[in-house]
Amino acid sequence: MKIQLQTPIKIGICNLPNRIVMAPLTRMRAPQNIPNDLMAIYYGQRASAGLIIAEASPISPQGIGYPATPCIYNELQVSGWKKITETVHAQNSHIFLQLWHVGRISHPDFHQGALPVAPSAIAPKGKALTSTGMQMFVTPRALEADEIQGIVEDYRKAAKNALEAGFDGVEIHSANGYLLDQFLRDGSNKRTDCYGGSFENRARLLFEVTEAVIGVWGAQRVSIRLSPSGTFNDMTDSDPETFFVYLLGQLNRFGLAYLHIVDALEGDVRHGANVVSLAVLRKAYKGMLIVCGGYDKLRAEDAINQGLADAVAFGQLYIANPDLVERFKLNAPLNKADATTFYGGTEKGYTDYPFLQK
Protein backbone atom coordinates (compact mmCIF):
# COMPACT_ATOMS: atom_id res chain seq x y z
CA MET A 1 0.00 0.00 0.00
CA LYS A 2 1.35 3.42 -0.95
CA ILE A 3 2.37 5.62 1.96
CA GLN A 4 1.04 9.17 1.72
CA LEU A 5 2.55 12.26 3.32
CA GLN A 6 -0.61 12.32 5.45
CA THR A 7 0.20 8.90 6.94
CA PRO A 8 0.98 9.10 10.70
CA ILE A 9 4.41 8.10 11.99
CA LYS A 10 6.22 7.80 15.31
CA ILE A 11 9.57 9.58 15.38
CA GLY A 12 11.45 9.25 18.64
CA ILE A 13 8.81 9.47 21.35
CA CYS A 14 6.59 11.74 19.25
CA ASN A 15 3.48 10.39 17.51
CA LEU A 16 3.15 12.61 14.45
CA PRO A 17 -0.15 12.98 12.53
CA ASN A 18 1.68 13.24 9.21
CA ARG A 19 5.14 13.04 7.61
CA ILE A 20 5.24 16.70 6.58
CA VAL A 21 8.02 18.47 8.49
CA MET A 22 8.70 22.18 8.63
CA ALA A 23 12.42 22.59 7.95
CA PRO A 24 14.56 24.90 10.10
CA LEU A 25 14.51 28.30 8.38
CA THR A 26 16.62 31.30 9.36
CA ARG A 27 14.37 34.37 9.09
CA MET A 28 16.24 36.98 11.20
CA ARG A 29 13.14 38.38 12.91
CA ALA A 30 14.58 38.41 16.47
CA PRO A 31 16.06 41.81 17.42
CA GLN A 32 18.55 41.54 20.31
CA ASN A 33 18.57 37.77 19.60
CA ILE A 34 15.42 37.24 21.68
CA PRO A 35 12.46 35.21 20.33
CA ASN A 36 9.30 37.31 20.25
CA ASP A 37 5.52 37.41 19.78
CA LEU A 38 5.73 37.78 15.99
CA MET A 39 7.69 34.53 15.87
CA ALA A 40 4.99 32.86 17.97
CA ILE A 41 2.38 33.87 15.39
CA TYR A 42 4.59 32.56 12.57
CA TYR A 43 5.15 29.15 14.12
CA GLY A 44 1.57 28.91 15.35
CA GLN A 45 0.33 29.41 11.79
CA ARG A 46 2.36 26.37 10.70
CA ALA A 47 1.48 24.05 13.59
CA SER A 48 -0.40 21.57 11.38
CA ALA A 49 3.01 20.21 10.38
CA GLY A 50 3.70 16.78 11.76
CA LEU A 51 6.89 18.24 13.23
CA ILE A 52 8.29 21.77 13.29
CA ILE A 53 12.08 22.07 13.42
CA ALA A 54 12.53 25.62 14.67
CA GLU A 55 15.17 27.83 13.12
CA ALA A 56 18.84 27.42 14.04
CA SER A 57 19.60 29.11 17.37
CA PRO A 58 23.15 29.95 18.47
CA ILE A 59 24.27 28.18 21.62
CA SER A 60 26.53 31.03 22.76
CA PRO A 61 27.55 34.57 21.77
CA GLN A 62 30.56 33.01 20.02
CA GLY A 63 28.17 30.95 17.87
CA ILE A 64 26.43 33.96 16.28
CA GLY A 65 27.05 34.80 12.63
CA TYR A 66 23.91 36.56 11.36
CA PRO A 67 21.91 39.56 12.62
CA ALA A 68 18.69 39.15 14.61
CA THR A 69 18.84 35.38 15.00
CA PRO A 70 17.08 33.96 18.08
CA CYS A 71 19.49 32.33 20.51
CA ILE A 72 19.23 29.85 23.38
CA TYR A 73 21.94 30.75 25.92
CA ASN A 74 20.22 33.09 28.40
CA GLU A 75 17.01 33.41 30.43
CA LEU A 76 15.38 36.06 28.24
CA GLN A 77 15.80 33.81 25.22
CA VAL A 78 14.37 30.83 27.09
CA SER A 79 11.34 32.92 28.09
CA GLY A 80 10.84 34.06 24.50
CA TRP A 81 10.97 30.52 23.18
CA LYS A 82 8.48 29.37 25.86
CA LYS A 83 5.78 31.53 24.27
CA ILE A 84 6.45 29.83 20.95
CA THR A 85 6.44 26.25 22.24
CA GLU A 86 3.24 26.95 24.18
CA THR A 87 1.58 28.31 21.03
CA VAL A 88 2.57 25.22 19.03
CA HIS A 89 1.59 22.78 21.78
CA ALA A 90 -1.81 24.44 22.14
CA GLN A 91 -2.49 23.07 18.65
CA ASN A 92 -1.28 19.56 19.57
CA SER A 93 1.83 19.83 17.44
CA HIS A 94 5.50 19.04 18.12
CA ILE A 95 8.52 21.33 17.88
CA PHE A 96 12.27 20.66 18.05
CA LEU A 97 14.93 23.38 18.35
CA GLN A 98 18.01 23.37 16.15
CA LEU A 99 21.23 24.03 18.12
CA TRP A 100 23.75 26.13 16.17
CA HIS A 101 27.33 27.36 16.23
CA VAL A 102 28.36 28.99 12.95
CA GLY A 103 32.12 28.71 13.48
CA ARG A 104 34.01 30.55 10.74
CA ILE A 105 30.80 31.74 9.03
CA SER A 106 30.83 34.90 11.12
CA HIS A 107 32.65 38.21 11.38
CA PRO A 108 34.47 40.23 14.08
CA ASP A 109 31.52 42.66 14.06
CA PHE A 110 29.56 40.04 16.00
CA HIS A 111 32.34 39.50 18.56
CA GLN A 112 33.55 42.95 19.64
CA GLY A 113 36.41 42.68 17.15
CA ALA A 114 37.49 39.14 18.08
CA LEU A 115 38.00 36.60 15.32
CA PRO A 116 35.46 33.84 14.65
CA VAL A 117 36.62 30.34 15.56
CA ALA A 118 37.01 27.21 13.45
CA PRO A 119 38.85 23.90 13.44
CA SER A 120 41.60 25.48 11.32
CA ALA A 121 42.62 29.00 10.33
CA ILE A 122 41.13 28.82 6.81
CA ALA A 123 38.95 31.65 5.53
CA PRO A 124 35.85 30.62 3.58
CA LYS A 125 35.22 32.28 0.24
CA GLY A 126 32.41 34.80 0.19
CA LYS A 127 30.94 37.43 2.46
CA ALA A 128 29.36 37.58 5.91
CA LEU A 129 25.97 39.22 6.38
CA THR A 130 26.38 41.71 9.23
CA SER A 131 24.17 44.43 10.67
CA THR A 132 26.08 46.95 8.53
CA GLY A 133 25.84 44.94 5.31
CA MET A 134 27.94 42.35 3.50
CA GLN A 135 31.61 42.08 4.51
CA MET A 136 34.33 39.72 3.37
CA PHE A 137 34.86 36.70 5.58
CA VAL A 138 38.03 36.90 7.65
CA THR A 139 40.52 34.16 8.44
CA PRO A 140 39.18 32.53 11.62
CA ARG A 141 41.15 31.57 14.68
CA ALA A 142 41.79 27.85 15.06
CA LEU A 143 40.35 26.56 18.32
CA GLU A 144 42.92 25.41 20.84
CA ALA A 145 42.48 21.81 21.97
CA ASP A 146 41.74 22.92 25.53
CA GLU A 147 38.89 25.16 24.31
CA ILE A 148 36.91 22.40 22.65
CA GLN A 149 35.37 20.98 25.80
CA GLY A 150 34.00 24.47 26.43
CA ILE A 151 32.17 24.22 23.10
CA VAL A 152 30.73 20.87 24.15
CA GLU A 153 29.61 22.42 27.43
CA ASP A 154 27.91 25.27 25.55
CA TYR A 155 25.88 22.67 23.62
CA ARG A 156 24.96 20.91 26.85
CA LYS A 157 23.79 24.17 28.45
CA ALA A 158 21.84 25.14 25.33
CA ALA A 159 20.18 21.72 25.32
CA LYS A 160 19.18 22.23 28.96
CA ASN A 161 17.78 25.67 28.09
CA ALA A 162 15.77 24.18 25.22
CA LEU A 163 14.31 21.65 27.64
CA GLU A 164 13.34 24.46 30.01
CA ALA A 165 11.79 26.36 27.10
CA GLY A 166 9.36 23.51 26.47
CA PHE A 167 10.62 22.00 23.22
CA ASP A 168 9.90 18.36 22.41
CA GLY A 169 13.50 17.71 21.41
CA VAL A 170 16.55 19.23 19.76
CA GLU A 171 18.36 18.93 16.45
CA ILE A 172 22.15 19.33 16.46
CA HIS A 173 23.09 21.41 13.41
CA SER A 174 26.08 19.66 11.84
CA ALA A 175 25.40 20.71 8.25
CA ASN A 176 25.64 23.60 5.78
CA GLY A 177 29.23 24.58 6.52
CA TYR A 178 28.82 25.58 10.17
CA LEU A 179 31.15 24.66 13.03
CA LEU A 180 30.44 20.94 13.46
CA ASP A 181 30.39 20.45 9.69
CA GLN A 182 33.70 22.32 9.50
CA PHE A 183 35.21 19.70 11.80
CA LEU A 184 33.77 16.85 9.71
CA ARG A 185 35.15 17.94 6.32
CA ASP A 186 38.82 17.69 5.40
CA GLY A 187 38.58 20.83 3.27
CA SER A 188 38.10 22.93 6.41
CA ASN A 189 39.72 20.69 9.06
CA LYS A 190 43.51 20.47 8.77
CA ARG A 191 44.13 19.74 12.43
CA THR A 192 46.86 17.30 13.49
CA ASP A 193 45.54 16.63 17.01
CA CYS A 194 42.79 14.21 18.09
CA TYR A 195 40.15 16.36 16.33
CA GLY A 196 41.67 16.13 12.85
CA GLY A 197 43.06 13.72 10.28
CA SER A 198 41.31 10.35 10.54
CA PHE A 199 37.58 9.80 10.12
CA GLU A 200 37.31 9.05 13.83
CA ASN A 201 39.10 12.25 14.81
CA ARG A 202 37.13 14.49 12.48
CA ALA A 203 33.88 13.04 13.86
CA ARG A 204 35.02 13.23 17.49
CA LEU A 205 33.51 16.64 18.29
CA LEU A 206 30.11 15.70 16.84
CA PHE A 207 30.09 12.51 18.90
CA GLU A 208 31.06 14.40 22.07
CA VAL A 209 28.35 17.00 21.48
CA THR A 210 25.79 14.28 20.77
CA GLU A 211 26.63 12.45 23.99
CA ALA A 212 26.37 15.70 25.98
CA VAL A 213 22.99 16.58 24.49
CA ILE A 214 21.65 13.04 24.98
CA GLY A 215 22.70 13.36 28.62
CA VAL A 216 20.16 16.18 28.92
CA TRP A 217 17.34 14.89 26.70
CA GLY A 218 17.69 11.15 26.18
CA ALA A 219 18.45 9.78 22.72
CA GLN A 220 14.83 9.59 21.53
CA ARG A 221 14.51 13.38 21.74
CA VAL A 222 17.81 14.20 19.99
CA SER A 223 18.53 14.40 16.27
CA ILE A 224 21.33 15.55 13.96
CA ARG A 225 21.33 17.40 10.64
CA LEU A 226 23.99 16.59 8.02
CA SER A 227 24.68 17.76 4.46
CA PRO A 228 27.02 15.17 2.90
CA SER A 229 26.85 16.70 -0.59
CA GLY A 230 26.77 20.32 0.52
CA THR A 231 29.04 23.01 -0.91
CA PHE A 232 27.29 25.93 0.85
CA ASN A 233 29.67 28.15 2.83
CA ASP A 234 32.64 26.94 0.78
CA MET A 235 32.59 23.33 1.97
CA THR A 236 34.62 20.57 0.32
CA ASP A 237 35.76 17.06 1.16
CA SER A 238 38.11 14.71 -0.64
CA ASP A 239 35.97 11.58 -0.15
CA PRO A 240 32.53 12.46 1.24
CA GLU A 241 30.85 9.15 0.40
CA THR A 242 33.33 7.01 2.32
CA PHE A 243 33.43 9.44 5.22
CA PHE A 244 29.67 9.86 5.61
CA VAL A 245 29.01 6.13 5.26
CA TYR A 246 31.44 5.71 8.18
CA LEU A 247 29.78 8.52 10.12
CA LEU A 248 26.23 7.23 9.67
CA GLY A 249 27.35 3.76 10.64
CA GLN A 250 28.72 5.17 13.89
CA LEU A 251 25.61 7.26 14.53
CA ASN A 252 23.49 4.10 14.50
CA ARG A 253 24.70 3.31 18.01
CA PHE A 254 23.15 6.43 19.54
CA GLY A 255 19.50 5.49 18.91
CA LEU A 256 18.56 9.02 17.85
CA ALA A 257 15.01 10.23 17.21
CA TYR A 258 15.97 10.82 13.59
CA LEU A 259 18.75 11.87 11.26
CA HIS A 260 18.05 14.86 9.01
CA ILE A 261 19.82 14.76 5.63
CA VAL A 262 20.08 17.76 3.32
CA ASP A 263 20.00 16.13 -0.10
CA ALA A 264 22.16 17.43 -2.95
CA LEU A 265 20.79 20.71 -4.26
CA GLU A 266 21.10 22.18 -7.74
CA GLY A 267 23.53 24.76 -6.37
CA ASP A 268 25.74 22.02 -4.91
CA VAL A 269 25.96 20.30 -8.28
CA ARG A 270 26.66 23.62 -10.00
CA HIS A 271 29.52 24.23 -7.55
CA GLY A 272 31.11 20.88 -8.30
CA ALA A 273 29.77 18.79 -5.42
CA ASN A 274 30.90 15.22 -5.08
CA VAL A 275 27.33 14.01 -4.64
CA VAL A 276 26.60 11.28 -2.10
CA SER A 277 23.42 9.50 -3.16
CA LEU A 278 20.52 9.24 -0.76
CA ALA A 279 20.38 5.49 -1.45
CA VAL A 280 23.93 5.07 -0.12
CA LEU A 281 23.10 7.05 3.01
CA ARG A 282 19.84 5.17 3.59
CA LYS A 283 21.71 1.87 3.43
CA ALA A 284 24.23 3.09 6.02
CA TYR A 285 21.73 4.49 8.52
CA LYS A 286 19.23 2.16 10.18
CA GLY A 287 17.09 4.67 12.11
CA MET A 288 14.45 7.24 11.17
CA LEU A 289 15.51 9.46 8.28
CA ILE A 290 14.09 12.89 7.41
CA VAL A 291 15.27 14.39 4.12
CA CYS A 292 15.03 17.88 2.67
CA GLY A 293 16.27 19.76 -0.36
CA GLY A 294 13.78 21.31 -2.74
CA TYR A 295 11.22 18.49 -2.53
CA ASP A 296 7.68 18.86 -3.81
CA LYS A 297 4.77 16.60 -2.82
CA LEU A 298 5.28 14.02 -5.59
CA ARG A 299 9.03 13.69 -5.09
CA ALA A 300 8.55 13.49 -1.32
CA GLU A 301 6.07 10.63 -1.53
CA ASP A 302 8.26 8.85 -4.05
CA ALA A 303 11.24 9.05 -1.65
CA ILE A 304 9.14 7.63 1.20
CA ASN A 305 7.69 4.81 -0.90
CA GLN A 306 11.11 3.87 -2.26
CA GLY A 307 12.29 3.51 1.34
CA LEU A 308 14.77 6.36 1.02
CA ALA A 309 13.16 8.45 3.76
CA ASP A 310 10.56 8.20 6.51
CA ALA A 311 9.46 11.85 6.37
CA VAL A 312 10.30 14.95 4.35
CA ALA A 313 11.07 18.50 5.47
CA PHE A 314 9.94 21.49 3.39
CA GLY A 315 11.55 24.92 3.52
CA GLN A 316 10.44 27.57 1.04
CA LEU A 317 7.08 25.88 0.61
CA TYR A 318 6.49 26.38 4.34
CA ILE A 319 7.57 30.01 4.20
CA ALA A 320 4.82 30.76 1.68
CA ASN A 321 2.18 28.20 2.74
CA PRO A 322 1.41 28.13 6.47
CA ASP A 323 -1.33 25.58 5.73
CA LEU A 324 0.90 23.35 3.60
CA VAL A 325 -0.56 20.16 5.09
CA GLU A 326 -4.08 21.13 3.99
CA ARG A 327 -2.91 22.25 0.56
CA PHE A 328 -1.11 18.95 -0.01
CA LYS A 329 -4.16 17.02 1.18
CA LEU A 330 -6.44 18.83 -1.28
CA ASN A 331 -3.85 19.16 -4.08
CA ALA A 332 -4.58 22.88 -3.84
CA PRO A 333 -2.51 25.60 -5.53
CA LEU A 334 0.51 26.81 -3.57
CA ASN A 335 1.48 30.38 -2.74
CA LYS A 336 4.81 31.49 -4.19
CA ALA A 337 7.53 32.61 -1.78
CA ASP A 338 8.84 36.18 -1.96
CA ALA A 339 12.62 35.81 -1.67
CA THR A 340 13.08 39.53 -0.97
CA THR A 341 11.43 39.06 2.43
CA PHE A 342 13.20 35.87 3.53
CA TYR A 343 15.66 37.58 5.88
CA GLY A 344 14.88 40.38 8.29
CA GLY A 345 11.95 42.76 8.28
CA THR A 346 8.58 42.51 10.01
CA GLU A 347 5.35 40.65 9.27
CA LYS A 348 5.55 41.20 5.49
CA GLY A 349 6.56 37.93 3.87
CA TYR A 350 6.50 36.30 7.31
CA THR A 351 3.03 36.05 8.83
CA ASP A 352 0.94 37.56 6.01
CA TYR A 353 0.86 34.70 3.49
CA PRO A 354 -2.80 33.76 2.82
CA PHE A 355 -4.44 30.57 3.98
CA LEU A 356 -6.86 28.64 1.78
CA GLN A 357 -10.29 30.21 1.80
CA LYS A 358 -12.71 28.01 3.70
Image (spheres, rainbow, N blue to C red):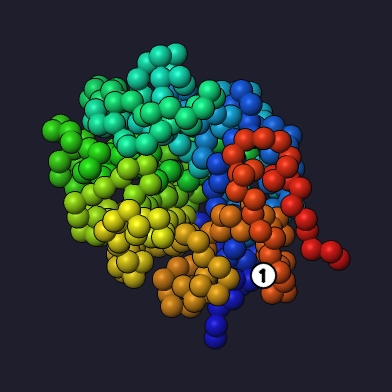
Q: Quick check: can you spot residue 325?
A: yes
Quarter holding residue 287 = bottom left
Residue at 61% x, 58% y is: 317
User: In this rendering, is residue 268 above or below 134?
Assistant: below
Front one among 293 and 124: 124
**Image check: 232 left or right of 328?**
left
User: In this rendering, is residue 338 above or below 151?
Assistant: below
Q: How many marks?
A: 1
- Label 1 SS: helix
- Which residue reaches farthest bottom? 1
Residue 226, horizontal then vertical, whole percent: 38, 51
Front one among 299 and 309: 299
Q: Which residue is mark 1?
A: 328
Residue 100, horizontal then vertical, whole percent: 45, 36
Residue at 56% x, 54% y is: 315
Residue at 59% x, 76% y is: 4
Residue at 48% x, 46% y is: 171
User: In this rendering, is residue 294 above or below 214?
Assistant: below
Residue 29, horizontal then vertical, whole percent: 64, 34
